[in-house]
Amino acid sequence: MNRICCLLFLFICLSQLSFSQGKFHVQNKNKSDKIRFKFINNLIVIPVEINGVELSFLLDTGVSKPIIFNFLNVSDTLKIKDTESIFLRGLGDGEQVEALKSRNNIFRVGDAINLNQDLYAVYDSKLNFAPRLGIPIHGIMGFDLLKDLIVEVNYSHKYIRLTEPQNFSYKDCDKCEVLHLEFYNNKPYINVKVNINEKDIPVKLLIDSGGSDALWLFEDDSLGINVENKFFNDFLGHGLSGSVYGKRSRVKSLLIDGFKLKKVNVAFPDSTSIAFAKRFKGRNGSISGNILKRFNIIFDYRRALITLRKNGYFKEKFTYNKSGIELAHNGVRLVREREKFIPSDHYSKSDTQNGTRIVLDNRYKMSLKPAYGIVELRADSPAEKAGLKLGDIILTINGKPAHEFRLQQIMHLFYGDTGNKIRLRISRKGVDMNFNFVLEDVFK
């Protein structure tokens, strides 16, 4: 699942963002509001209302301004105004993307309201993350909400709490660690240590709740930041400026003050994909959702502090996609389904005295169901060696129709135990075919 949503690694460095705008305020007597979120692929999806329209956004600490993606007809639906065209650049080795900058928008997140919020609407058709997440995602937001309020993220119980700073009180917490934040282009960074080749190396990492991987590191021989032992080349995600590829491996440990995580998944993105991200010379990588979820977190941007308390996810083992398959929604399929036995409209007397004959029909219906297609296939992976190809449409998984699974349930199977057998029936250019493979652990 981490691979899927690395596509959401939008480490976007927006320039010239110093224009005036309003602030978020919690509009209730307690000056605090608790908001439930959906937790998908280590990502936080919160409800956001913009100009009266209810949408779903990722809470992404790696972005400074709210960004809405192209599949909304923003001009009509959101009634945005005061616009101008600009170009943005982020991760990936592609070109800049065109966006529409808008001022004076009304944002509501629970009871927190900003009456004068800036936003960006991106029209690139590739930036539609719903197919790979399985639910609609209309945009991302981070800094503008976090800078105005104390934001508590409770990964354990899947809610965030927004509180006015003057109404927030810290509780005594012997098991918490409090770290100082550094900011660059309105993005938060922390200093931690990674153990590579038996050496603890200090690194400065972007806190990126909009990425679902665990850890990204930028290779640097002078610091000893490089692939330690076994690795494999892989698709890491899709950024604002294109696809990101690199190496996947593991580091022996990650030290976050007093917390130690062992055998942590790490990705080393290709240098061409992160050239823009490395403009901040002090940055060595990112710490993302698969690590952040292991803590309940308090973000206090005004004091430049982050408070961490480990939760039930802390001891969860780091795993990865052992199949080599990346799936996405690929439209819909017409599926012939058998309905339940339905009594006919009448009962008829049987030939036996006082008997009743019930007439039952075997009825079928045609229904539109989601189709799942292979959009990435890792070289030399079990799936590729079995003969699967890009564009194949999954019909059944282990004998069960694919449409009876949610997308993330299928991906969860691909993260299963080494040795698990996967049986797929697929459609390739109208021809149905069967394939079998076994999940393999590259690191053993």
Image (spheres, helix red, strand yellow):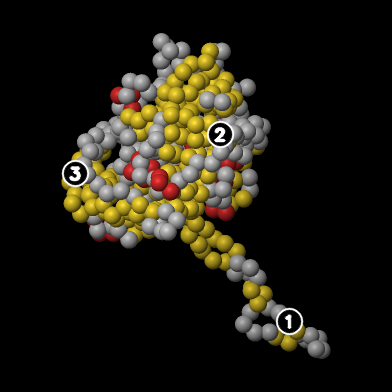
Q: What amino acid type is highlighted by mark number 1?
A: Arg
Compared with residue 182, is residue 42 higher up or lower down, i.e. above or below? below
Return the disc, 2 or 3, that comes first in the chain's sequence: 3
Q: What amino acid type is highlighted by mark number 2?
A: Cys
**In this figure, which residue is indicated by the disc labeled 3?**
85
As drawn, is 12 to the left or to the right of 8?
A: left
User: Residue 269 lies in what quarter of the image?
Assistant: top left
Q: What amino acid type is highlighted by mark number 3?
A: Ser
As drawn, is 254 to the left or to the right of 105?
A: right
Return the disc, 2 or 1, that comes first in the chain's sequence: 2
As drawn, is 360 to the left or to the right of 335?
A: right
Q: How many marks?
A: 3
Q: CA distance from mark 2 to mark 1?
A: 71 Å
> Closer to the camera: disc 2 or disc 3?
2
Residue 29 horizontal/vertical position (percent): 42, 59
Q: CA distance from mark 3 to mark 1?
A: 72 Å
Q: Nearer the viewer, residue 87 or 411?
A: 87
> Closer to the camera: disc 2 or disc 1?
2
Residue 49 horizontal/vertical position (percent): 36, 56
- Residue extending furthest toward the top: 222
Residue 169 horizontal/vertical position (percent): 48, 44
Crowd rating for badge 2 (residues with CA inside 10 Å; few <14, some 14–19, many 20+): some
Residue at screen point 73% across, 87% down? 349
**In this figure, which residue is indicated by the disc labeled 2?**
176
Q: CA distance from mark 2 to mark 3?
A: 45 Å
**SS for tag 1?**
strand
Contact (Cβ within 8 Å) of mark 2 with mark 1: no
**In this figure, which residue is indicated by the disc labeled 1?**
357
